[in-house]
Image (cartoon, rainbow, N blue to C red):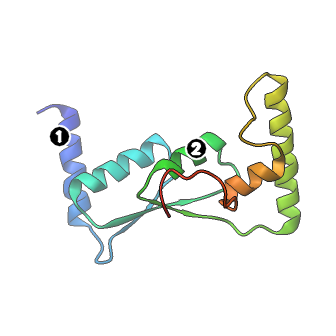
């Protein structure tokens, strides 16, 4: 057995040995470490809920990836209107920087469009999975 296979076996055994009665709460960032833990939990057969807390620093690519994971719940923040304005302005700057570099921005026309997508408020946006 390879060293990696042995480490995987140990991780699965530990997940099973310490499984809480109501299952694990997996804080899921959308990164490779979170994917690894989620896969190990799936392989072990333990009960778990993977949850992504949308933060103020999530890259659109990360959010898109997390949304593509059908077994991850996304918790959206409730933003103070002042903070929302600041985020919209930051998204406007991001779109302008993308346009200046010749990168695609067709998905969003404005910072408000990005904000609605980011918070899941755009009822017309395409979804990969039914919610």
Which comes before the other along the chain, label 1 or label 2?
A: 1
* Front position in the image: 105 or 79: 105
Label 1, label 2: how many angstroms apart (C-alpha)? Answer: 31 Å
The foreground one among 25 and 97 is 97
The reply to whether residue 29 is visible in this rendering is no
| Farthest residue, direction top | 102
Count of marks placed on residues? 2
**For the point 43% across and 44% down, which residue is it?**
33
Work out which residue is located at the far front of the displayed protein and give it.
124
The label number, if any, that marks residue 6 in the structure image = 1
Q: Residue lying at the far bottom in this picture: please name it.
A: 21
Q: Are marks 1 and 2 in contact (CB under 8 Å)?
A: no
Query: Who is closer to the viewer here, 118 or 46?
Result: 118
Residue at image coords 76%, 43%: 108
Residue most toward the left?
1
**Left or right of residue 127: residue 18:** left
Q: Quadrant of the N terminus?
A: top left
Mark seen at residue 62:
2
Q: Residue 43: image x %, image y %?
A: 23, 52
Residue 60 is at least partly visible in this image: yes
Image position of 8 (left or right of 23):
left
Disc 2 is placed on an element classified as: helix
- Coordinates of residue 24 in the picture (x, y in percent): 36, 67
Residue 131 percent location from the top left of the image: 50, 64
Q: Which image quadrant for residue 94? A: top right
- For image coordinates 65% across by 43% down, the residue present is 60
Choose top left, top right, bottom left or bottom right for residue 14: bottom left
Residue sitting nearer the eye, 58 or 66: 66
Disc 2 residue crowd, few under 14, some 14–19, many 20+, Cα 10 Å? some
Q: Quadrant of residue 74 in the image?
A: bottom right
Disc 1, SS: helix
Q: Residues within 10 Å of mark 1 (few under 14, many from 20)?
A: few
């Amino acid at each position: 057995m390879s060293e990696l296979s042995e480490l995987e076996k140990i991780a699965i055994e530990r997940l099973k040995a310490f499984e809480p009665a109501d299952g694990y709460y997996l804080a899921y960032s959308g990164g490779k470490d979170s994917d690894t833990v989620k896969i190990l939990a799936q392989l072990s057969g333990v009960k778990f809920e993977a949850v992504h807390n949308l933060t103020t620093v999530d890259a659109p690519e990360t959010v898109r990836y997390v949304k593509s994971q059908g077994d991850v719940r996304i918790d959206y923040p409730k933003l103070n209107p002042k903070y929302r304005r600041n985020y919209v302005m930051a998204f406007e700057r991001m779109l302008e920087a993308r346009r200046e570099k010749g990168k695609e921005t067709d998905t969003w026309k404005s910072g408000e469009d990005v904000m609605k997508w980011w918070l899941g408020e755009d009822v017309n946006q395409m979804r990969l999975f039914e919610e």
